[in-house]
Image (cartoon, helix red, strand yellow):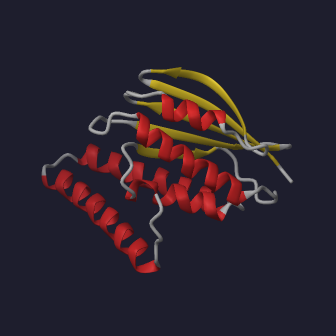
Amino acid sequence: MKKEWDMIEVLRHSRHDWLNRLQLIKGNLDLDRIDRAKSVIDEIVIEALQETKLSNLPMPQFASLLLKANWNENAFRLEYEVLEDQEAFNIQDEVLADWTKNFFISLNQAIEIFHENHLFITIAPQAEGIRFFFDFNGIIINKKPIEKFLAEQKDMVIVTVRGFFENELALEVFMPFL
């Protein structure tokens, strides 16, 4: 989580991801699985649109964290969705990015490493602030790191636990606009 990314590393990871996707499309075309190839292309388009929405939000540190999350050694796969584009707002980006980075650390400490763990973040800008829904599905083998993290909350990050079980964690996080 503490890795500093330079432009070359970002481009290397991005190029690797694109080559994997192109090989997946080509392989499906070679096997005459046209519908699957089209499905992969549709998934790529949806993901690219979400990356654009995320990148356009005035939260560069948070956006960078999410964009690079699957290139780090996390024990979970991250997906996200931005529900609305809302350009003009002011939020404590550094506080949000730090909170999220520390949440990722506690989640990695709490979950089964060699399991298909999935974290989905929904980002919903609203009139008075921005709301995030963190939905984790996987195997939680030790709740203590997450419980400790949630007990040490910051004033600007309002967290509501919607569910916390051995295979699911649902958090609602709200940050008011400045």
The residue under the point 67% across, 52% down is: 96
Residue 52 can be seen, yes or no: no
Looking at the rendered structure, the number of numbered marks drawn on it comes to: 0
Question: Who is closer to the viewer here, 9 or 55?
Answer: 9
Position of residue 147 in the picture relative to residue 10 (left or right): right
Vertically, is 155 above or below 56?
A: above
Question: Extreme bottom residue here?
Answer: 8
The residue under the point 66% across, 39% down is: 152
Residue 24 placed where, x, y %? Answer: 24, 55
Residue 146 placed where, x, y %? Answer: 53, 34
Residue 12 placed where, x, y %? Answer: 35, 73
Position of residue 84 in the picture relative to residue 163 (left or right): right
The residue under the point 40% across, 79% down is: 8
Vertically, is 118 above or below 67?
A: above
Vertically, is 44 above or below 118?
A: below
Rendering quarter of residue 147: top right
Question: Who is closer to the viewer here, 61 or 16?
Answer: 61
Question: Who is closer to the viewer here, 165 or 24?
Answer: 165
Rendering quarter of residue 54: bottom right
Question: Extreme left residue here?
Answer: 31
Residue 174 placed where, x, y %? Answer: 74, 39
Residue 76 can be seen, yes or no: yes
Quarter of the figure that contains the C terminus: bottom right
Rendering quarter of residue 141: top left
